[in-house]
Image (cartoon, helix red, strand yellow):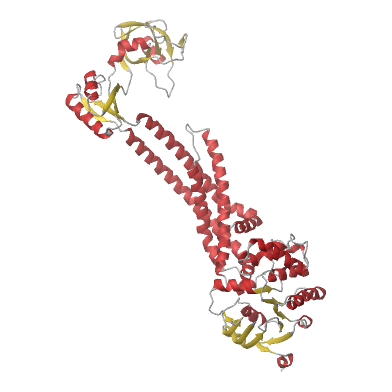
Amino acid sequence: MLDKVMIALKSIGKNKNRNFLTMLGIIIGIASVICILAIGDGFTHVATKGMQDHNTKNKVTLEFTASSDEDTKSGFTRDDLAVLEGIKGVDHVKLTSSNPEASVTVQHQTKKTSATLNKVPKRVKLYRGFGTILNSDDTGNIFISKDLADRAFKGKALNKRLVINDNVYVVSGIYKIGDFEYRPDIYVSKTTFKQLFAGQISQDEARLSVQPSANKKAVGKSAVNEMKKFGEDSKLGKYSISHPDQISKSFTKTLNNITYFVAFVAGISLLIAGIGVMNVMYITVSERRKEIGIRRAFGATAGDIRNQFLIESIVLCVIGGLIGIALGYGVVQIINSFLPFKAVVTTYAIIMSLSVSTIVGLVFGFIPANKAAKSPLVGLLKEE
Amino acid sequence: MLKVTDIGKTYGKFIALENINLEVSDGEFLAIMGPSGSGKSTLINILGLLDQKYTGEYLLKDKSYKDANDNYLSRIRGDQLGFVFQNFKLLTTYSVYENIEVPLIYSKQKQANKRELIEDVINKVGLEGKEKNTPSELSGGQQQRVAIARAIVNRPNLIIADEPTGALDSKTSTEIMDIFTNLNKAGTTIIMVTHDREVADYAMRTVYIRDGHLYNDEKSVKK
């Protein structure tokens, strides 16, 4: 086998330019396949990983959807928590909020406006004011957004007093909200948030940790039923199980469809490349009629000749495929510096590309190789 | 070695060969003479199992291959026959060594044995030191030596040579004919087509062919 590959390499090397141009189609086709698969695989990996964070094993999330859009207070109560924890198969329950901000009314002098409020993150980059931190015990100071400052104070807000839900605070910093950024209008210290605002935020999610032995689905179902019967806010909205699983599945499916489409386009380019290979193999076969005749006279069977040209066609395509993989890998490294996630060239993609090039060589080399094998011997030996 | 009975061959209405009867014994050196278009090449294509479309009977080593399949014929050609052509028919991009190797690729020879066989025939035809050269770097005589080496590397029973000196000057022709004579002395049967009387004189026996008919002596041809 190795000697046959060597023969193939030798005759490919004899017409380097012609064969390189033929390979170009394969190279571009395979490089695109590698890029598409790398982007698709990278994206799927990131997307499904993100989804899985919300949906770890043995967890069921119950959602409460209020009937009224303005209702931000109803959800799961402490009593509901007790009911849920009493369900068979439930290990423990944690109540959370899908929107952990409080909606508040703020007042400066006589002007009232509504705003969103949250506890301060570790650091806030201030636009006006000093420092970046609100300490836990700093209960009298707040940071507000430039937007709120403009609305409530017409700009000059620093060190002024602001009334939030009947308590008075001093604005000790103003921050800007970027174009693609989401931040609440007001940051208060952690202590203040816990004491005065946390209770206002509706607990509209209940995360049930299910015992490993219990059936996740059944537990989820009975939890919904229990809440319908005993939930304190059951008249104000509906309970349901949230399905991050389904989201990720349909998302992956869409992504796959896109991948298939682009792969289809790459397939067409490979088809055209294949026709190029077929053309060059036809030329090779007719140029080498003398060689075929000699080999046949000295014992080569029709099958030997067919294999020789098939191997040549496959070797040609596989070389193209290997160059294509290298090129695709290079392009992936370049596009990785522009992509928000990391495109990865998987072993699967490499194996797939090599198989595709082999198949292109096999399919498009077959007819010319067969022509070579079936040429009548006497005619071949008259060739010079 | 071989026996031909009533062989005929036509191309459409043109009769290329008619009623050919010929017997060649083991170890014989036969020359077939005739002008171009007389049917010489057609006859040796049949004798060399390159052409199976003929009427009559051809037995090689008492065996008919008329209905043999292509694969079997290829094997017989590779194992029992060796061809030498007028224009050498060497693979121009291959080295001397690789050209001689061709018949061994398709035979069942063990790899280890290959080098030995090739070196042996290179010595026999006097091409020592030229193994790595390509045909274009060799003279006509040297190229024909390569072709002879390739024809004998599989140790065939029968060598079929079609105008082996046709492209060579007389001095080189003599050298090539000496090689054939030596091979024949060593026991190889040779059938050679030529239109050169001096070359034919190296053979033990000469037959003549004209307009598709075979004659055993020149007088009958002229009749």
Q: How many marks?
A: 0
Across and down, in percent, residue B181 comes to: 76, 77
Judged left or right of residue A36, residue B1 is right
User: On screen, A107 above or below B153?
Assistant: above
**What residue is drawn where x is 64% and y is 53%?**
A17
Q: Is residue A327 above or below residue A22?
A: above
Task: Name which quarter of the figure residue B101 lies in.
Answer: bottom right
Could you tell me which quadrant the C terminus of chain A lies in?
bottom right
The residue at the point 58 percent across, 85 percent down is: B57
Q: Residue at 21% of width from left, 31% of height from top?
A: A222
The picture places residue B24, in percent across and down from the top left corner, at: 67, 84
Q: Vertical placement of A328 versus A368: above or below?
A: above
Query: Does any portion of residue A298 appear in the rendered image?
Result: yes
Q: Quadrant of residue B115?
A: bottom right
Residue at the extreme bottom of the image, as rendered:
B223
Quadrant hosting residue B14: bottom right
